[in-house]
Amino acid sequence: MWPESSEKKQPLRTGLTTGTCATACCLAGAHLLLGNIHKTSASVTLPKPKGASKHVDLELKLVEHRGPTTAYAETIKDAGDDPDATHGATIWVTVSLVSELGIKFCAGAGVGTITRSGLLLEVGQAAINPVPRQMMSEHLTHLAQLYQYTGGFKVTIGVVNGAEIAKKTMNGRLGIVDGLSILGTSGIVRPFSCSAWIASIHQGLDVAVANNYAHVAAATGNASEAFIGEYYALDDMQLIEMGDFAGAVLKHLKKSPVKRLTICGGFGKISKLADGHLDLHSGKSSINLPKLAYTAQRLGADNDLVTAIKACNTSLEALGLCQQQDIDLAAAVCQDALTFALTTVPNSVQLEIFAVNRQGELLGRAAGVAS
């Protein structure tokens, strides 16, 4: 799980995706083969869903011939200020001229292979996502026209130590084996972007559904994931690293419905869900101690306890006060979280909410069915 980051006052530096890095290497290799031009940098045109084209220049670490019809190029990925596992990794590409028309993409050492259905690519294909494939294809097609080349290309992409780096990602859980994915939708890495994590949540749900799993569990952190995985003896493919993005899980069920969803999290996170928040990050939502006090009062807490809860510093402190008086605040909070979450998921989904403490021990649970 990613740690919650402290907010920085200064602007954060953007970076470049592995797809942009691979495209730069493709360009350099093709220029060397077709025009005998040795590039020390490459200008990549980024995908443009709207507006004018944007170009970025990447410095190349090495460009050289690897035979009469093959060239090799490599660059160092700069992810900017994003805590990206591939920051500083060496991305390399070999480009070969072939007689067969078109462009064939292959996984080199350190780039994974798709082994499970539910992703954007077919099983058995190299884990080079559609947008990077499109970027490289467009740049190579342009160079072929520029140099009046009428043959095809074979493009092999690799990442130095990619198999080791991949262990820090969710690739294994998604069924991408032996390496990393070549990623990117905009070509740019935006620091601490929610989009990358949300995309991985959606992919995890899609893969679970495509592989016929009826039960999926989404967890807010390591302790909650370890608990729920052991509690139900779940496979890795059934576990979703939800983090703070409860809404990303619940809303995606409309596209990838599962029969049964379990959400498991720390008590504080679950109390935020009970308060109607779908983003559980501390910068987006806060613990509502007055509501916890009201919930305790509903369960029979006296005025002294209600006042004490309102004065607490944390949700766990409030929970501890309730436990001393045998008031099951955790179960009530789980029930409130369930009631709210059921308004978001499609009908007939069986939904469970579990709350655990920081040691991964069960505090409370609730279950119900959307109707």
Image (cartoon, grey):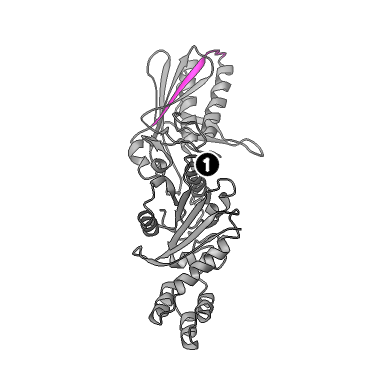
Residue 294 visible in the displayed image: yes
Tell me residue 153's x, y (percent). 49, 19
Residue 285 visible in the displayed image: no
- Horizontal side of 321 relative to 260 (left or right) equals left
What SS does tag 1 mark?
A: strand
Tell me residue 81's x, y (percent). 45, 49
Segment colored magenta: 148-158
In this view, the residue in front, 274 or 214, is 214
Q: Where, quadrant-wise, is the C terminus in this rendering? A: bottom right
Report the residue at 43% width, 79% height from top: 322
Q: Main secondary structure of the magenta part?
A: strand
In this view, the residue in front, 191 or 146, is 191
Report the residue at 50% width, 25% height from top: 27
| Within-10-Å neighbours for mark 1: few <14, some 14–19, many 20+ | some
- Against 288, residue 265 (above or below) is above
Tell me residue 111's x, y (percent). 40, 33
- Horizontal side of 275 relative to 162 (left or right) equals right
In this view, the residue in front, 194 or 16, is 194
In this view, the residue in front, 199 or 25, is 199
The amino acid at mark 1 is: Ile
Residue 9 magenta? no
- Against 140, residue 186 (above or below) is below
Tell me residue 103's x, y (percent). 51, 21
* Residue indicated by mark 1: 188
- Against 320, residue 87 (above or below) is above
